[in-house]
Image (cartoon, coloured by chain):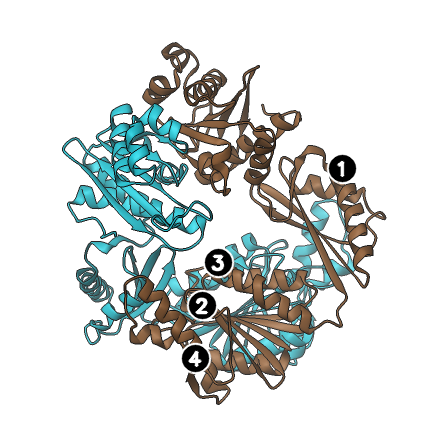
Chain colours: A cyan, B brown
Amino acid sequence: MYGEIITIGNELTSGRTRDLNAWYAAGRLTESGLKVIRITSVGDDRAKVSEALAAALAASRFVIITGGLGSTDDDLTCQIAAKAFARPLCLDERMFNAIKAYVELRGKSMTPSLEKMAWMPEGSRIINPRAGVCGFSMTEKGVHLYFLPGVPEQMRYLMEKFVLPEIVSRYNELPLLRQKTIKVFGINEPAIAEMVKKLRGKTGEALLGFYPQFPENHIAITLRGNDESLLLSELKRIEKAIEDLLGPCAFARDSEMMEDVTGRILAEKSLTISVAESCTGGLIGHRITSVPGSSAYFLGGVIAYSNKVKTLLLGVSEETLATFGAVSGQTAAQMAKGARELMQSDIGLAVTGIAGPEGGTDEKPVGTVHIGLSARDNTYCGMYRFSGGREQIRTSTATMALDWIRRYLNGYPFLPGL
Amino acid sequence: MYGEIITIGNELTSGRTRDLNAWYAAGRLTESGLKVIRITSVGDDRAKVSEALAAALAASRFVIITGGLGSTDDDLTCQIAAKAFARPLCLDERMFNAIKAYVELRGKSMTPSLEKMAWMPEGSRIINPRAGVCGFSMTEKGVHLYFLPGVPEQMRYLMEKFVLPEIVSRYNELPLLRQKTIKVFGINEPAIAEMVKKLRGKTGEALLGFYPQFPENHIAITLRGNDESLLLSELKRIEKAIEDLLGPCAFARDSEMMEDVTGRILAEKSLTISVAESCTGGLIGHRITSVPGSSAYFLGGVIAYSNKVKTLLLGVSEETLATFGAVSGQTAAQMAKGARELMQSDIGLAVTGIAGPEGGTDEKPVGTVHIGLSARDNTYCGMYRFSGGREQIRTSTATMALDWIRRYLNGYPFLPGL
């Protein structure tokens, strides 16, 4: 059940094109319970393609090869495969007739380059023998090779319709594969690794993977087996064990984002929110409104970049600004309260900080950020010091601010600041 | 000057993550005049990583390896490289101290997993020996190997700052290479290609590359030669020829972004701006403030997501909303004027539109966006219809709005809408 993917094309090795075919095939094969052990991209180069095919024959049970099947001079895959496996190229009549019918229907006539597409290595089986979208497969030394076009839409069509079903049925003794991703904010990767070590012996056959995605960390749990319901209950057990360790820092599962989670809770509780942003300049609003339907709970915001806007719109007092400065807990609190009252929302959320690269002082270095949250009953504020460049500080600030909403609504304590 | 790229991580072979590192490294190496012969992705698997390293040693002069350098248990690259090349792992004191200082500054202490990151194969040279972002390189059988982190931002930083310059200087029998990127907004790729065809015969030895970067298109001019001053004057000549063809649609060069350009002009003219955003939810403010020093010209904004905020803060009249709707030129114009007056800026910029996926009608389908710009002398508005999903529509809207500022300040006509 081990397989690999070979993608062919100068556009891949020169970085002109992103290799969507390899990514797609790897994802679909993995989801189908198969294991991809290697992805190799080579240019339109006889020696390198042959080498990749030879390496694949030695290591894999099946190989998906994409690219180089067209009619132009640099489309060499058929010839290379024929040579590598010492099979003569034979004219496939069914394919020849299909191409001929296709071009004649369009008032064109057969050319040598089109005819070339009907010459296949001996013993090949054509996949979808129609002009336009087709590939071919062969078995060599017990390894199943699938040659598909490089055009992503065509490749995907043939994968879904012919190749995946064939591979899956061929390996139907295969175990099932189930995955779950837990997203974490507020604990760094080494600390998570230390924590999860404690689970050793309790995670059974599960594979745990760590994927930092600044400023979050993602933990992927992967399980393989034969029994679907057993897999799912085992997955649930491990998920719970990890979440118990991480506590409220585990904020979402799978594809859910922080803004989805906060939005969901706001919608469930029928509460509305407004924001007042200084250093993030609109990023929090942008993230909240990236969720379709966010107008149900998000009323709007004030980007209070200048002090004038802080006083004029949000009612931050001149005295507060003069005494404590624009980057202070007092200002954050007044901004949050100001936003809430101005836009008549249930909750007001505010951030003010120094994103750099300039503007830091000894007392308030770059990365100093204050967050304020004002609800009808109370106003909260906290200070953090984020590291990284300007955009990283702004991203950390936005995620932390969204996390404040989540924690406030769930009754969790805010992450400790300074 | 032949090299290859090896990317390591289960997230790549399982298709969970697109391999942006391989794509990026391949593109940058090619642009720098080097040839990438193969890209191999393998999982966090000792045997497969060793095999890939051995194959690379046999075929390439340099190898870029990314991934597996973190502190968790599945980060095995150092150990695999040590074993593959029979080099013991040694504690690098400089690295150890850098990590120690980094964590202590944050009030944490050293852990075994962090210490692991300071153990490198004997004879390695550390690239950027700071905690946070570093890699290492070594020379084995005359092949230069560069081990970089898998986090794209970190990988790109180290590539640009250390690895590319080193590789390029190592192969200094290479001719000089000079590049210029022209960024274009408002003309699509096929139309640019047609335009540039007209230049045939006038671009000498230059290579022209096209890189769509939604919603912009980038044209890269690459020149190679021996004489620096000749190269630069030739580059300038071709740059000018292309810009003459593209007119005001060519908005920036090299790493400059639309927000840098608009910011620069605002600063030069000592003008201030404020924004009123509906469908973009804060994205325009976020982009304007991504430029360090933007507080010199950006006063703030109103995220007017709900109609209540549009009337309450920006003074959009109830009648306008009832007669023309929130997504209308009239509303955009009133929002722009409202923002300008409220925040006392020279210019007010507003957007209102339907980003989808819901909310479209026959008359105003998803993607309908109105932009308004209010200056002391006049107020302008225009309607566009953008395609794509929610985030693409929001991105197009923000770029178009920023382009309006640039065109207004430069006296260019706005891009034609509907």
Q: Tell which of B12 and A218 is nearer to you.
A: A218
Q: Is residue A162 visible?
A: no
Q: Which mark, by number, is residue B153? A: 3
Q: Look at the numbered disc 3 and give the secondary structure of its residue.
A: helix
Q: Chain of mark 3?
A: B
Q: Chain of mark 1?
A: B
Q: On the image, numbered disc 4 is attached to which residue?
A: B92
Q: Amino acid at mark 2?
A: Arg
Q: Which mark, by number, is residue B130? A: 2
Cβ–Cβ under 8 Å for marks 3 and 1 = no
Q: Quadrant of the rendered structure where residue A327 is? A: top left
Marks 2, 3: nearer the viewer: 2
Structural crowding at the residue carrying mark 4, measured as other residues with C-alpha within 10 Å and reported as few (<14), some (14–19) or many (≥20): many
Q: Amino acid at mark 1?
A: Leu
Q: Amino acid at mark 3?
A: Glu
- Say whether disc 3 or disc 1 marks the residue closer to the N-terminus: 3
Q: Quadrant of the rendered structure where residue B353 is? A: top left
Give the side of residue B269 with respect to residue A58, left or right: right
The alpha-carbon separation of the residues under discs 3 and 1 comes to 34 Å
Q: Chain of mark 2?
A: B
The N terminus of chain A: image quadrant: bottom left
The alpha-carbon separation of the residues under discs 1 and 2 comes to 46 Å
